[in-house]
Image (cartoon, helix red, strand yellow):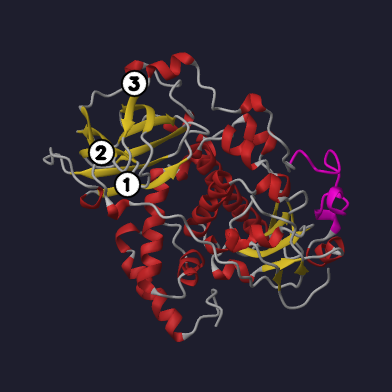
Amino acid sequence: MSGQVGDLSPHQNETLIKFKAALSDVWNDSFDDYYLLRWLRARRFNLAKAEAMLRNHLEFRKTWRVDTILEDYKPPEVIVKYFPSGIFGVDRDGNPITWNCFGNMDLRGCHRAITREQFIRHVIYLNEKMAQLKKELSKKAGRVIETHTSVEDMEYLSIQRHYYWPGIKMLQEYMTIFEDNYPEIIKQFFVIKAPRVFPIAYNIMKPFLDENTRRKMKMFGRDWQEQLQKYIDPDNIPAYYGGNRNEPDPQCSDYLCLGGDIPPEYYMINLTETSQEEMELIQVGRGSTTQVEYTIDTPGSCIRYEFITKDYDIGFGIYHKPLKAKARWSAGSMTPKVKSERRNSHIVPESGFHICETTGIYVLRFDNTYSWTRTKEVKYSARVLPPDTEICQTDGFNGYDEQGELSASKRSTSDNSKDNEDEFEDAQVRFDSDIHTSVCIPLPDLAGYIPGHLLCSWSTSSANW
C-alpha cells in the first residue's frame, strides 16, 4: 500500500492511530491524516522514528519562529536578485512548480554575501510560502494538494564554478533542513540541461537526500523540452524553457530568478574597523577549546552572536548546563543546543541567534580540537536580548540598541587538552548512483578540484543522451 490517505494497509492504519495518541500532548489543528502520514511515510511507518522526527520539527518551528515567518521575514536584496529559484505555474495535475537554476548559482558569492542565518530563514520562507500556496490551490481544486513538482536547471554547472566546499556544505544544510522538516512534499523532480559533470554534484548531495526523494528524480536529455511538456502544459512553462508564458519577459522574471554572479559589493567579509574593534578577541589554542558562558535567568531570552576568524575556520556550537554548574564542563557532559560544526568564518562572518527556552548557563564553545598545529584567532560579539525581541526583523547586530540588551553574567574559559569525543572528521562521500536515467560520461581532468575518491567515470542503466 502507498501509505496515502485512502490507501493504507491494516498495519499502516494501526500505526496512524498510535501516532495520533502519541502526539496528544502537542496536538494542534494542522494534524490531519494527510499531514501525519507524510511523517510516517518518511520513516517507513516506524512509529518511534516518525514521532521523534515530528517532535524535532516542532522544536525547529519554535526556534526559528516559523509560524510567523511569512509576515516577519523580508528577503535581503542580494537573495531577491541572485538566489536562483522561484514558483511559477502548475503541472498537468494541478500541483505547483518550483524552478531552480542551480547551474547558474554563484556558490562562492552566496557564501560570501549571505549569512548562515539568512540562508536558513530563506529556506524556511520558501517552503512555508509553497505550503501556503498548496492550501490555496487545494481550496480552489476541492481536493488536497500536498506535493509539488520541482524543475532543476543545471545549465552552466561546472567544477570550476561549483566545487567550492563551503558553498557545498551550505547546500547540504539546505538538503538536511528540507528532508528533516518538509518530508514527502515532492511529487516529481526533473533535471534538465545537465552537463557532463552533473553526476559529481549529484553524488556529493545524494547522502543528504531521502531515498524516496531520489526515486522521484528524472533526468531529461537533449529532448528535455518535449519531455517537460509531457508533465507540464506549455501555458504553464516560461518561454525561456520552451513554453508560452512571457510575464513580463521569456524568463518570467517577476516570478523566477535565474541567478548569476553576485557582485563583490554584496560581500560581507569586509567588516568596518569600528565593528571589529567592538568585538572581543580570543585565542583558541591548537587542539583546544574556549568556552564563553552566559547565565540566563529569564526563559525565552535570546543570545545573538557574531564572530569572525583570521585565516582559518573554527568549530562552533552552543551548549546548556544547569545554573548550579559553575565549573567548566566538557561538551559531552552538556546538552547541545546548536550543533557544533566547523564554520568558515575566515571567509564570511558567522552570525546567528539562539532562543533560550529554559534558564541555565548557555555556553558558546569555540572548538579547535581538530587542529594540532594552528592556534586560531577569533573576534566575537554576543548579546542577550529579552524575550519576544523581534529577532526576525534584523540580520545582524546593528538593528538593536544598547537598551534592548539584558544583563547577563559572562565568563570565558579555555581548555588546552585534546577532547577526542569532539574531534571533527571530514565527511566521506561515496560515488554511486541510482538516478532513473542513463549516461556514460568521460570526465575531464579534475585534479585539484575534487577529492580523489570522486575521480571516476559514471554510468547507469538506459536513456537518451
Q: In the displayed image of the protein, which residue is found farthest to the top?
A: 274
> Looking at numbered disc 1 in the image, what kind of residue is underneath it?
Lys
Q: Which residue is mark 2?
A: 362
Q: State if disc 3 and disc 1 touch (CB < 8 Å).
A: no
Q: Residues within 10 Å of mark 3 (few under 14, many from 20)?
A: few
- The residue nearer to you, when weighing 464 against 401, is 464
- Compared with residue 205, is residue 85 higher up or lower down, i.e. above or below? above
Q: Earlier in the sequence, mark 1 or mark 2?
A: 1
Residue 365 lies, in percent from the top left, at: 30, 39
Q: Count of labels shown?
A: 3
Magenta run includes residue 457 = no
Q: Which residue is mark 3?
A: 404
Q: Earlier in the sequence, mark 3 or mark 2?
A: 2
* Residue 373 image label: none
Q: Earlier in the sequence, mark 1 or mark 3?
A: 1
What residue lies at 24% left-to-right and 52% top-to-bottom?
Answer: 332
Q: Is residue 85 visible?
A: no
- Range of residues picked out in magenta: 234-255
Quarter holding the N terminus is: bottom right
Magenta run includes residue 239 = yes
Q: Main secondary structure of the magenta part?
A: loop
Q: Which residue is mark 1?
A: 337
- The residue nearer to you, when weighing 244 against 291, is 291
Residue 282 lies, in percent from the top left, at: 32, 27
What residue lies at 28% left-to-right and 53% top-to-bottom?
Answer: 420
Q: State if disc 2 and disc 1 touch (CB < 8 Å).
A: yes
